[in-house]
Amino acid sequence: MPWERCLAEQAVFDWNHVPGLIAGVDEAGRGPLAGPVVAAAVILDPARPIAGLADSKALTAARREVLFAQIQAQALCFCIAQANREEIDRLNILQATLLAMQRAVQGLTTTPARVLVDGNRLPVLAIPSEAIVKGDAKVAAISAASILAKVTRDRWCAQLHSRFPQYGFERHKGYGTAEHLAALAEHGACAEHRRSFAPVARVLEGR
């Protein structure tokens, strides 16, 4: 079967049984109004399977924390990388996301045979790669990457909350909730708010 499949074929193909070492890649933090976008790349150990891997958004925070530790302990290798707020504002969120993914793959200590990336866009890589729509629900290695990225970014938000408690980052994780938008209107933008995102730009213009 050729690698260039249409989306319908992707839906039925079992990507977990592709020959050779597979690195799964996913990100967290494209939509929020503040902070970095975080990407992770994971090569799972076929001899040490991890039960319960799923799209990080479908798991409770407590379950993500358990799996986060388990993935780090049992994966053949992994790398967590990011593109910071300044890079997001300079490049745009899509290009910054692809940059973070590229950094995560380049940081792996083992070179995989193929890289499978969640979504429909690929970073520039020297390794054969494939974009898998909804891959975090189809490929165990991508599920693992989504968990590493999500937990890392959520922890970052908790740290940011300790610096700027008036915004409520620990609760909304930087997304544009009513609480967050009200705090932006009242307090203005902090150093980690993404200046290129419309709600933040409007606040800055108003001030």
Image (spheres, rainbow, N blue to C red):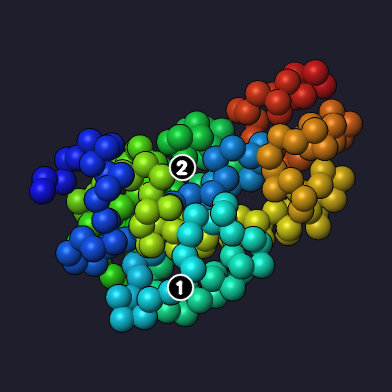
- Between 176 and 134, the residue placed more toward the observer is 134
Percent of width and height locating residue 201: 69, 24
- Between 134 and 111, the residue placed more toward the observer is 134
Q: How many marks?
A: 2
Q: Nearer the viewer, mark 1 or mark 2?
A: 1
Which residue corresponds to the image point at 61% horizontal and 67% vertical from the top-left? 63
Secondary structure, mark 2, is helix
Residue type marked 2: Thr
47 on left or right of 195: left
Q: Which mark is residue 51?
A: 1
Measured along the vertical axis of the image, is residue 151 above or below residue 132? below
Which residue corresponds to the image point at 27% horizontal and 56% vertical from the top-left? 15
Residue type marked 1: Ala
Percent of width and height locating residue 26: 44, 52
Q: Which mark is residue 60?
A: none
- Between 40 and 74, the residue placed more toward the observer is 74
